[in-house]
Image: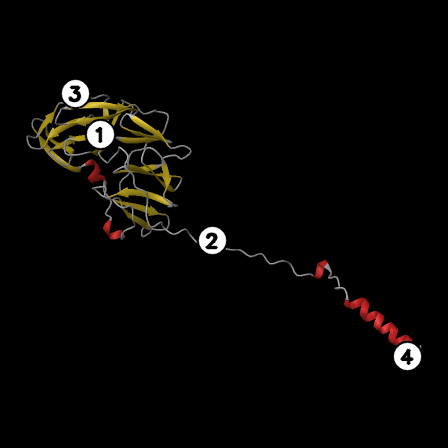
Amino acid sequence: MTRLVAAVLVALLVTLTSGCDLAEDDEMAPKPTRTVTRSPAPEEPASVPTGEGDVSPASVVWAQESTLHFGTSRVDVAPMRIDSFVVVPGGVFFVSRGELWFTDLSRVRATGLMGVTRVSTTRDADALRVDLAGGSDEVAPYDLGTGKSIPPSQVVPATDADLRGTAERVVLTPGGAVEARRGPGHYGLVGGEGEQLVAYDASTRRRIPLKGVVGSGFRLVRWQDGTTFFGLALGEDGTPLAVMSCNLSKRSCTKVGEPDPDRSLVFESAA
């Protein structure tokens, strides 16, 4: 082979190989790397909604599934359901499948709070406490006047005693000593959960006859003020018969509504 022929062959080989990439065996190629990104937990919102609906902690409110009853009126919040709720000035906060919502009775708004295990208010319903999944120290507190977040120390949730009165043993005339629940004023109720509704005057220690009482048992939900309260009238077998509101200064009770016995019944929660 002459030098000229050898040079031509080398030049041709360089030209053929420099213009293309060499294919890589699929089995030898490195596997693609999967990148897993963890989404950060949503931060607690700086505020929650407020409203001016015609409802307050003094209102008679209960819920069944997606229906919120306030007095003789109702609001359906479907597709949400009402697992628990608290009544605040101008609206209702309710928990649906761990998410907190707010309604002023004309529309429903999300709060952005997820993983909610309990919701409660202070005794005067001027602040909201939202307990979150993760421990006793995981709370979101809000001022209900402004809706803005506030320090947890400023929110002391209302207790069962704040809503239903203080348990005490009182001596009535006639009748002797009985177990009772003293309301925030001069009145109280005799007996325990599910017993017949009997009211008394703490000043005179005498029973108060009430007109309009239905059922053979009664479950107290809350005192609305010093003279009025509401609860659930029960049948002999404990079946819910009616939501009943009573005014001790007028010595009478009024049937506000009749719950559906086939649907779960929810009243306001407390700490």
Q: Secondary structure at mark 1?
A: strand
Q: Sort mark 4 into few (<14), some (14-19) or many (20+) by Cα contacts within 10 Å.
A: few
Q: Quadrant of residue 186?
A: top left
Q: Are marks 1 and 4 in contact (CB under 8 Å)?
A: no
- Badge 4 or badge 2: first in the primary sequence: 4
Distance between mark 1 and mark 4 Cα atoms: 113 Å
Distance between mark 2 and mark 3 Cα atoms: 60 Å
Residue type at mark 1 is: Phe
Residue type at mark 2 is: Ser
- Badge 1 or badge 3: first in the primary sequence: 3
**Which residue is label 3 attached to?**
211
Q: Quadrant of residue 91?
A: top left
**Which residue is label 2 attached to?**
39
- Badge 3 or badge 4: first in the primary sequence: 4
Residue at horizontal 20 percent and vertical 36 percent from the top:
164
Q: Sort mark 1 into few (<14), some (14-19) or many (20+) by Cα contacts within 10 Å.
A: many
- Badge 1 or badge 4: first in the primary sequence: 4
Q: Secondary structure at mark 4?
A: helix
**Which residue is label 1 attached to?**
230
Residue type at mark 4 is: Arg
Q: Is residue 190 visible?
A: no
* Camera-side residue of 145 and 255: 145
Q: Are marks 1 and 3 in contact (CB under 8 Å)?
A: no
* Camera-side residue of 221 and 168: 221
Distance between mark 1 and mark 3 Cα atoms: 14 Å
Q: Are marks 3 and 4 in contact (CB under 8 Å)?
A: no
Residue 235 locus on image (x, y percent) = 27, 22
Q: Is residue 209 above or below residue 10?
A: above
**Which residue is label 4 attached to?**
3
